[in-house]
Amino acid sequence: MTTLMIDAGPASPDSPLTRTGGVPLAPAGTEWPCCASCEGPMQFLAQVVLNNLDAGASESKLGVLALFACQNDPGMCSDWEPASGGNRALLFPLDGLEPLPRPDGAEEALLVLGAVRAVEPHQEPGDDYHLAREAWAARSDRPESSVLGQLGGDPAWIQGDETPSCPSCADTMPFVVQLEEGPDHSTAMNFGGAGCAYAFACAPCGRASLLWQC
Ligand SMILES: [Zn+2]
Ligand SMILES: [Zn+2]
């Protein structure tokens, strides 16, 4: 089974559900992530509610994933590498989240995705993401670009397998979400042009990692 992320249209920018774009939700006191290279505030990409991904996992251990990448000088901050400091994947508990205030002094410099898209999960038979995406598009008479990615399952790597290790416990990190750039070029995320991002989370350590390939 592949859990596709279907574009369900516009969403409220502070919706507590899985979405791309909008405003990140975070515990009070969280600081807006800044890039290790250029030190500027990162672009918020997506929020993914992980609690229903794995029926076998303890609900209390999962939470909400917030994904960020530096777009201040595209190509210069190694935002495709999980350990570069050019991107950030934050794992938060589900409860007590509030809209993350924009960083002081950087309100105008902050790059924001031009659209907020709600994600409707859809279960498609088979474990191959690309085949599931094709099959869903053909049957529903919608473009493949309406598939925004997949939740859990097996990453469909564009390049080789780059599954990271957890920075805390050093175990292989479980894969949690794959994101497409998005259906509209003017509001798309930048994963190098028709690339995909891959996020991983180690729930016991509360750590997450993000990388992209194209
Ligand atoms: Zn940067
Ligand atoms: Zn760990």
Image (tube, rainbow, N blue to C red):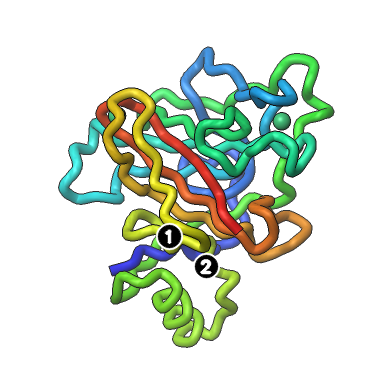
Q: Are marks 1 and 2 in contact (CB under 8 Å)?
A: yes
Horizontal and vertical percent for residue 192? 68, 54
Most distant residue in the right direction: 108
Q: Which residue is pictured at 41% across the width and 36% down the height? A: 64
Q: Is residue 2 above or below residue 196?
A: below
Q: Which residue is pictured at 52% across the width and 67% down the height? A: 147
Left or right, residue 3 beside residue 187? left
Q: Which residue is mark 2?
A: 147
Left or right, residue 53 beside residue 195? left
Q: Which residue is mark 1?
A: 150
Give the distance between the C-alpha atoms of the residues marked 1 and 2, in whole angstroms. Answer: 8 Å
Q: Quadrant of the N terminus?
A: bottom left
Q: Which residue is pictured at 42% across the width and 65% down the height? A: 4
Q: Within 8 Å: ligand 2 and the Cβ of disc 1?
A: no
Camera-side residue of 116 and 205: 205
Camera-side residue of 40 and 83: 83
Q: Residues within 10 Å of mark 1 (few under 14, many from 20)?
A: many
Horizontal and vertical percent for residue 14? 57, 38
Q: Quadrant of ligand 2?
A: top left
Horizontal and vertical percent for residue 173? 33, 40
Horizontal and vertical percent for residue 119? 49, 57
Q: Is residue 13 above or below residue 129?
A: above
The amino acid sitting under disc 2 is Val
